[in-house]
């Protein structure tokens, strides 16, 4: 099992990197390279995946704010004022 563990870790990281690269936003990819080229680089199991995570992966961004919370509903019943009034 000890001999298989490093290969398993590389395989899981490689698969995660490939899926992350495929599902990332085309406009958010860094490094000055297109998303297609990054995907081809990420095909290389250890080196390509490491390069993707270090240089190509989009940085974390916050979702855009609309300015108003109109139409937004509480998630849980105990956060809903109408529900609490009815108790």
Image: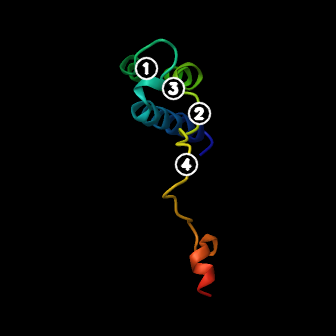
Q: Of marks 2 and 3, which one's residue comes earlier in the chain?
A: 3
Residue 19 found in image quarter: top left
Is 69 situated above or below 12?
below
Mark 1, other Cα within 10 Å: few <14 / some 14–19 / many ≥20: many
Q: Which residue is mark 4?
A: 68
Disc marking residue 49? 3
Q: Of marks 1 and 3, which one's residue comes earlier in the chain?
A: 1
CA gap, disc 4 to disc 1? Answer: 37 Å
Disc 1 element? helix
The mark closer to the camera, 1 or 2, is: 2
Q: Position of residue 1 (x, y in %)?
A: 59, 46
**Residues at marks 1 and 3 touching, judged by CB atoms closer than 8 Å:** no
Q: Which residue is mark 2?
A: 60
Disc 4 element? loop
Q: Of marks 4 and 2, which one's residue comes earlier in the chain?
A: 2
Q: Position of residue 16 (x, y in %)?
A: 49, 37
CA gap, disc 2 to disc 3? Answer: 18 Å
Disc marking residue 38? 1
- Which quadrant would the C terminus be assigned to in this image? bottom right
């Amino acid at each position: 099992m000890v001999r298989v563990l490093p290969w398993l870790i590389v395989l899981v990281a490689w698969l995660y990197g490939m899926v992350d690269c495929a599902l990332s936003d085309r406009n958010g990819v860094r490094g000055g390279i297109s998303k297609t080229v990054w995907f081809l680089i990420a095909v290389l199991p250890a080196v390509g995946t490491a390069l993707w995570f270090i240089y190509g992966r989009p940085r974390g961004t916050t979702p855009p704010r609309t300015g108003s919370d109109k139409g937004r509903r509480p998630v849980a019943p105990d956060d809903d004022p109408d529900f609490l009034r009815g108790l």
